[in-house]
Image (spheres, rainbow, N blue to C red):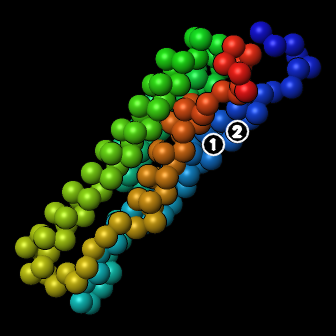
Amino acid sequence: MAAPGAPVPRRRRVGAALLGAGLLTVLTAAASPAWRTVYADRVALRPGAQLLWVALPWALVCGLVAVVSLARVGPSRRPWRVASRGLLVSTVLAGAALTAAWWYFSATDPYAREDGMLSTGPGPGTWLALLGCLLVPLAGALPGGPSPDRGS
């Protein structure tokens, strides 16, 4: 345990900032449109609050692992850092795959084409949710500072 007056390591300060920014970005995504579909006579927007049932639990699970990774020091931190890194990679892959699949099936929907749909795609809420879900596990995957046994 560090002394009360000891400076906070840079890794923890940056990690806490990334964690806070990620969770705030996920919550901000709820206020932005998640999906935008353009029809010949109107533009349909899906609210970003519909993303929260997926993005918020994922961000909280990643945040829990990131908090433990940021709190640990020494060799006991390595498994949590590796877990955060795995969550980061799986977030990139799953987020991209789910967004691309949803986009593909929305764009090729024959019933929507009959209604006069011209184009469809993710809105700013989707991009904010994906960005927030990437920042949270990144906070726990940050490398530690140089240690005496590994050199600088």
Say which amino acid is labelled 2: Val
Up-down: is 37 above or below 90?
below
Say which amino acid is labelled 1: Leu
Q: Quadrant of residue 90?
A: top left
Residue depicted at x 58% and y 11%: 76
Q: Residues within 10 Å of mark 2 (few under 14, many from 20)?
A: some
Horizontal relation, residue 78 to residue 86: left or right: right
Q: Quadrant of residue 105?
A: bottom left
Up-down: is 48 above or below 133?
below
Image quadrant for the N terminus?
Answer: top right
Disc 1: which residue: 18
In the foreground, 99 or 76: 76
In the foreground, 3 or 85: 85
Disc 2: which residue: 14
Q: Which mark is residue 63?
A: none
Query: Residue 139: x and y, percent?
Result: 59, 36
Residue depicted at x 49% and y 57%: 128
Q: Are the residues flagged by discs 2 and 1 in contact, CB closer than 8 Å? A: yes
Q: Is residue 91 visible?
A: yes
Horizontal relation, residue 5 to residue 132: left or right: right
Residue sticking out furthest to the front:
151
Residue depicted at x 38% and y 52%: 51
Query: Residue 92: x and y, percent?
Result: 38, 46
Image quadrant for the C terminus?
Answer: top right
The Cα atoms of the two marked residues, 2 and 1, are separated by 6 Å
Q: Residues within 10 Å of mark 1 (few under 14, many from 20)?
A: many
- The secondary structure type at the circle numbered 2 is helix
Q: Quadrant of residue 47?
A: bottom left
